Amino acid sequence: MENSYTNSFAKIYDDIMQEVPYQFWFKYLKDLLSYYNLEVESILELAAGTGNMTEELINLPKIKEIKALDLSSAMLERAENKLSQYELKNLKLEFVQADMTDFKFPGNFDLILSVFDSYNYLLTEKDLKESFSCAAEVLQKDGLFIFDMNSIKRINTIEEKKTMLEGENYSCLWEDIVNTKESVWQVKLQISPEDDKLPAFEEFHTEKGYEIKTIKKLLQQSGFKGVEVYRSFNFFKANDKVDRIYFVAALSEERLAEKKGFMTKLYFSIKNEFKYLLIGLKTIFKQTI
Ligand SMILES: C[S@@+](CC[C@H](N)C(=O)[O-])C[C@H]1O[C@@H](n2cnc3c(N)ncnc32)[C@H](O)[C@@H]1O
């Protein structure tokens, strides 16, 4: 992740991502937790970025501890500022600058979470396996490890193009570059501050797509005996053709054995699909007015 998520991008990240429906993602997460009967008291959030999901997680009713980890100190600094506005009485919130391929903590967590395709930033199977093994070491026996990824199909079908993003104090030239042979998507960003006397800043982001079977294999090799894959944002089984995949992993197979049955899955799926449709319509409506 060299030369990405520097201060220049961290500063404008929230503005660029303002349409990302974190609140909706949080609702889906709550449905997953409810389905698997997990009352969460402690969370390790991997690649927490500027804390947009952390800001939702603090609302979990029984939450007592959150560790938000990210490699970028610039992103974490934003997260820390954002979360400092809340009076968190019974919650220990900590920000940790670390690599998600190499971490260790004394305690165990009920939930290890990572959202917004942060796992696609790990570009080798070795890195993924190292990260999964670290996660397995710090997960409670009955805890869950939940993360999303862009599918291999999504990465390979991204259209190569340049887009100019204009903010209040910046402009940002966003260029998508795709290598379908390697299933690698690069974003080249040229960020120009409002003050055109200052030079433009360039950074690269790289994501890699993996087949579901590869991720499942690596999870299993790292100690996760139970793995379910869902299409975002429902409870139907994902395949490599959907865009975003949610992985739900547990240390034992039994932990993921059906908890609330098919009808609950169907109810959660319909509810979330409907909400997602509304969010899509709202975005289209905003863009047309
Ligand atoms: C697309 S952003 C997502 C951030 C946040 N999860 C969100 O939903 O807004 C990807 C994040 O992954 C972090 N990241 C990338 N590689 C990492 C690594 N090896 N270890 C820890 N964080 C990493 C980046 O710093 C960045 O904050």
Image (cartoon, rainbow, N blue to C red):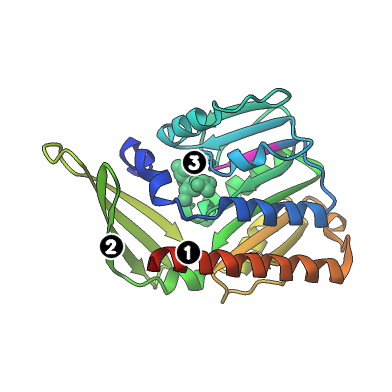
* Label 1 CA crowd tier, 10 Å (few <14, some 14–19, many 20+): few
Residue at image x 72%, y 66%? 271
* Label 2 CA crowd tier, 10 Å (few <14, some 14–19, many 20+): few
Instruction: State whether the magenta stretch is mostly helix, strand or loop.
Output: strand
Locate the N terminus by quadrant: top left
Q: Nearer the viewer, residue 217 or 27?
A: 27
Callouts 1 and 3 close, C-beta under 8 Å: no
Mark 2 sits on what residue? 163
Mark 3 sits on what residue? 49
Instruction: State yes or no: Cβ of the residue under disc 3 lies below 8 Å from any atom of ligand 1.
Output: yes
Q: N-terminal of the two: label 3 or label 2?
A: 3
As measured in the structure, the alpha-carbon distance from the residue carrying label 3 to the one carrying label 2 is: 23 Å
As measured in the structure, the alpha-carbon distance from the residue carrying label 1 to the one carrying label 2 is: 18 Å
Residue 46 within the segment the image draws in magenta: yes
**Residue 125 location (% of width, % of height):** 54, 56
Q: N-terminal of the two: label 1 or label 2?
A: 2
Q: N-terminal of the two: label 1 or label 3?
A: 3
- Position of 284 compared to 38: left or right? left
Residue at image x 20%, y 41%? 194
Q: Is residue 224 visible?
A: no
Locate the C terminus by quadrant: bottom left
Residue 283, numbered circle:
1
Which amino acid, mark 2?
Thr
**Residue range highlighted in magenta:** 43-47
Q: Is residue 228 above or below residue 26?
A: below
Q: Is residue 62 visible?
A: yes
Foreground label between 3 and 2: 2
Residue at image x 78%, y 56%? 225
